[in-house]
DNA sequence: TTTTAAATATACCGATTGGTATATTATTAG
DNA sequence: CTAATAATATACCAATCGGTATATTTAAAA
C-alpha cells in the first residue's frame, strides 16, 4: 500500500520509485491510473481516512447513547497510537502539517476531513442534548472543536516524544470533562 | 534567512538551490560552512528555537510572580500565530512532524527543545508551590506537559484550519485551569 | 606591498527526480 | 479463434538533486 509511505515520509520525500517498490508496479502502470504524483497522494490520503473513519464508526456502534458514544470516542483513541502506526502515523496531523505551504489540494482535503469529524462529534452532542443526556448549556460545535484540538495535541506529542502517556493523560482529562461539564 | 524555508517546506522539499536564492550565496560558500544539508537544517532549527525561547523569556520578565508567569505564557501564545508566521510556522510542530520517520538527528533536537520548555514551565510551577501561590497538590511536570500538549494541539489546528479561534479558545481554557486548579 | 589564509564562486559530477511515448502483454468482445 | 481494448512494462527524457574539486576573490598578517 502506498498511503503509509506518503504518510510517514511526506509528499516531497516520497518518490515514484518508492511507490513502485511498495506496490509492485512500474511507473507506466501507475501513471495509467493517476494523472500525477499529487493525484496519487490525494487518493492515498482519502483511502487512509476512509479506513480511519470506518473504524471509528464501528467502534461507536457499541452504544446508542450519545454520552456513551463520546466516551467511546475517547476509548477509541486509547488505542490510536498502535492503530495509526499501521497507517504510517496520524494522517490528519502528518498530511496536515506536510501539505501546509506546500500542497493546496492536499491541504484542502485535510481540512474537509477535520470538518467532517468535528461535525460528526457535534451531531452526537446535539443528539445527547435532545435525548436529555447532555446539558442544554453546551454548544455542540464548540465542544467538538475543543475535544478534537485536545486529541490532535496529544497525537503530536505522543508521536514526537514516542510516549503514549501524553495520549492517555489527555484522554483521562477528556473523560473528566464529559463527566463534569456535559453530563446532566 | 534559511530557517523559515526549512520550517515551511520541510527538509526534503527544501533544495540547496532554494537556500542559495534566499541567502544570496552559492553552494560552494554554503558547503564551506556546513558539512551537509542535514547540518544546515539542524543549525536553522536551533537558530529559530533560540529566538523563540528568547522572546518567551523576555515576555515572562513582566512579572516575578510564578502564577503570573503562567498567565504570561498563555498571553504569549495569544500572539503566537502572528509571531510564528515570521518563523515559517511553529518550528516544534513543523520540524517535529517532518523529521519523524525521516531525520533522526533533527527529531532528537526537537525532543530536546520540548523537554527544555517543559522543564522551564515545571520550574515555574515549582517556584509557585514554594512561594505558596500554587497548591502543593499539583505535580509540576504533569501540569507542564498538560499545558504544552494543549498548546501544540491549538497550534496545529490554528495553522491547518487557518483559524485563530482554536488558539484563543484553548488559551481561555488554560487560564481557567490556572485559576481553578492551581491557584490557592 | 607581498604573502598567506580564509571565504566564496564556478563548473562540474553521478544519481535521482517526475513524467511520457511507445512497445508489449492481458483481458474482453465478437 | 480473432480483433479490439485495456492494462502494464520498457526505455527514455530534460530537469533537478546533493555534493565536490578547483579556481578565484577577499581579507588578514608579515
Image (cartoon, coloured by chain):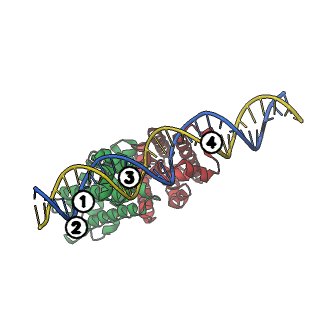
Chain colours: A green, B red, C yellow, D blue
Per the image, label 2 sits on a secondary structure element best described as helix
Which residue is pictured at 35% across the width and 67% down the height? Answer: A142
Sequence-wise, the earlier of marks 3 and 2 is 3
Seen from the viewer's position, the closer of residues A2 and B174 is: A2
* Residue under pointer 1: A70
Question: Percent x, y for residue A122?
Answer: 28, 67
Sequence-wise, the earlier of marks 1 and 3 is 1
Same chain, labels 1 and 2: yes
Instruction: In the rendered structure, find residue A94 and report the number of the disc placed on it.
Output: 3
Q: Nearer the viewer, mark 1 or mark 3?
A: 3
Residue B26 shows in this picture: yes
Q: Which quarter shows the C terminus of chain A?
A: bottom left
In the picture shown, does residue B78 fall above or below C26?
Answer: below
Question: Percent x, y for residue B12?
Answer: 46, 48
On screen, residue B20 versus residue A12, left or right, reads: right
Instruction: Determine contact: label 2, label 4, CB under 8 Å.
Output: no
Alpha-carbon span between mark 1 and mark 4: 58 Å
Same chain, labels 3 and 2: yes
Alpha-carbon span between mark 3 and mark 4: 34 Å
Q: In the figure, residue B99 lies in which quadrant? A: top left
* Residue under pointer 4: B28
* Residue under pointer 2: A128
Which residue is pictured at 28% across the width and 59% down the height? Answer: A178
Alpha-carbon span between mark 1 and mark 2: 10 Å
Instruction: In the rendered structure, find residue A167 and report the number of the disc placed on it.
Output: none
Instruction: Determine contact: label 1, label 3, CB under 8 Å.
Output: no
Q: Circle 2 marks a residue in which chain?
A: A
Which residue is pictured at 44% across the width and 57% down the height? Answer: B155
Alpha-carbon span between mark 3 and mark 2: 32 Å
Same chain, labels 3 and 4: no
Sequence-wise, the earlier of marks 1 and 2 is 1
Amino acid at each position: 500500500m502506498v498511503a503509509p509511505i506518503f504518510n510517514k515520509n511526506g509528499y516531497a520525500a516520497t518518490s515514484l520509485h518508492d511507490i513502485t517498490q511498495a506496490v509492485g508496479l512500474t511507473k507506466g502502470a501507475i501513471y495509467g491510473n493517476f494523472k500525477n504524483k499529487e493525484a496519487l497522494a490525494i487518493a492515498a490520503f482519502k483511502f487512509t481516512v476512509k479506513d480511519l473513519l470506518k473504524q471509528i464508526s464501528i467502534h461507536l456502534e457499541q452504544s446508542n447513547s450519545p454520552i456513551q458514544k463520546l466516551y467511546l470516542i475517547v476509548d477509541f483513541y486509547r488505542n490510536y497510537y498502535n492503530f495509526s502506526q499501521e497507517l504510517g502515523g496520524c494522517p490528519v496531523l502528518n498530511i496536515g502539517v506536510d501539505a501546509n505551504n506546500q500542497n493546496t489540494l492536499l491541504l484542502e482535503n485535510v481540512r474537509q476531513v477535520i470538518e467532517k469529524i468535528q461535525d460528526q462529534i457535534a451531531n452526537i452532542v446535539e443528539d445527547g442534548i435532545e435525548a436529555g443526556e447532555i446539558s442544554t448549556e453546551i454548544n455542540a460545535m464548540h465542544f467538538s472543536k475543543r475535544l478534537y484540538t485536545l486529541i490532535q495535541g496529544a497525537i503530536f506529542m505522543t508521536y514526537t516524544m514516542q510516549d503514549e502517556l501524553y495520549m492517555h493523560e489527555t484522554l483521562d482529562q477528556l473523560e473528566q470533562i464529559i463527566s463534569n461539564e456535559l453530563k446532566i
